[in-house]
Image (tube, helix red, strand yellow):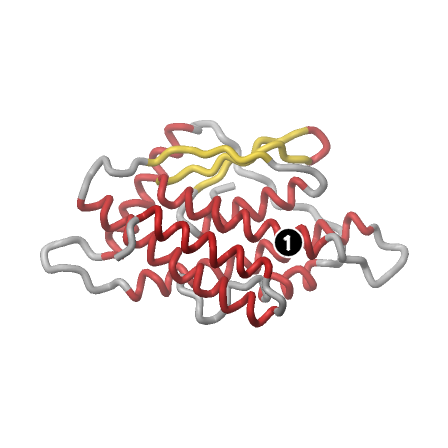
């Protein structure tokens, strides 16, 4: 089995190849493999941490968000984090913008989130710059905000399914050790408790209010965001 640095480097290289691929099919092949390895890496790290208490503990990583569409980018990060067993805190700015997002979870999962988000953000920002509403009287900015929302929602749905498949593939563990499902449930509980202690008064985020008509187109793009069917792999 590859060591942790080598695994992550392989994942980075696969995502880089996906971003540079000449065709959507080629990109899907590279990213499907990257997400498959990422899920296995996450499960492996969870099982190792369960066997070695203190190996990994919950904490936070803050990632800056840039305009334009910082709120949509923040939502993509938060929903990616949620699918990969982390929580999120959005640091708001005036005018509905977001200055940064703190991703809270185990270090191994935060690393996965940041690595995947970097690739997804590049895909999303490249595509959203080309988006225009069908009707000339609709705001381009509103359309793009709703497009990003749809993209993030679909990516989140697909990542949740991929993580579940990854966990199911690792159901067999040595006799006398906790099951994979029990280990993951315990990690979720640890993250929830540590998050509540770190942010005891955080308000529940309001649902996004979007007027643009790009939601469906964004969801369609999210389905093509190279987390293919073969992929196995915030509280905001």
Looking at the image, residue 55 lies above or below residue 164: above
Point out the residue furthest to the left here.
176
What is the x, y in percent for residue 136? 89, 58
What is the x, y in percent for residue 63? 53, 35
Report the front residue among 125 and 173: 125
Residue appearing at x 71%, y 54% in the figure: 128
What is the x, y in percent for residue 170? 26, 62
Report the front residue among 230 and 153: 230
Which quadrant of the view contains residue 126? bottom right
Which quadrant of the view contains residue 104? top left
Report the front residue among 116 and 185: 116
What is the x, y in percent for residue 8? 39, 50
Crowding near the residue tagged with mark 1, few <14, some 14–19, many ≥20 C-alpha atoms within 10 Å: many
Seen in the image, is 154 located left or right of residue 69? left
Looking at the image, residue 53 lies above or below residue 173: above
Residue appearing at x 43%, y 64% in the figure: 33
Residue appearing at x 18%, y 41% in the figure: 52
Quadrant containing the N terminus in the rendered view: bottom left
Seen in the image, is 10 located left or right of residue 53? right
Report the front residue among 199 and 106: 106
**Label 1 residue SS:** helix
Identify residue for label 1.
Answer: 124
Looking at the image, residue 99 lies above or below residue 76: above
Residue appearing at x 38%, y 45% in the figure: 109
Which quadrant of the view contains residue 193? top left
């Amino acid at each position: 089995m590859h060591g942790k640095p080598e695994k992550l480097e392989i994942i980075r290289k696969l995502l880089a190849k996906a971003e540079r691929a000449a065709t959507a099919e080629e990109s899907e092949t590279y990213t499907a493999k990257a997400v498959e390895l990422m899920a296995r890496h996450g499960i492996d790290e969870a099982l190792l941490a369960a066997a070695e208490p203190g190996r990994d503990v919950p904490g936070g990583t803050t990632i800056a968000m840039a305009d334009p569409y910082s709120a949509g980018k923040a939502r993509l990060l938060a929903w990616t984090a949620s699918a990969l067993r982390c929580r999120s805190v959005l640091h708001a700015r005036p005018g509905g913008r977001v200055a940064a997002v703190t991703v809270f979870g185990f270090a191994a999962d935060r690393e996965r989130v940041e690595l995947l988000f970097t690739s997804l953000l590049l895909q999303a920002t490249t595509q959203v710059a080309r988006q225009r509403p069908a009707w000339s009287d609709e705001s381009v900015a509103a359309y793009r905000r709703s497009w990003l929302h749809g993209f993030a929602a679909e990516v989140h749905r697909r990542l949740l399914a991929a993580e579940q498949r990854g966990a199911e593939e690792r159901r067999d563990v040595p006799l006398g050790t906790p099951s994979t499902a029990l280990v993951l449930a315990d990690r979720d509980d640890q993250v929830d408790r540590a998050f509540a202690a770190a942010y005891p008064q955080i308000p529940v985020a309001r649902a996004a209010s979007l007027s643009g008509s790009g939601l469906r187109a964004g969801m369609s793009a999210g389905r093509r965001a190279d987390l293919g069917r073969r992929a196995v792999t915030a509280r905001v």
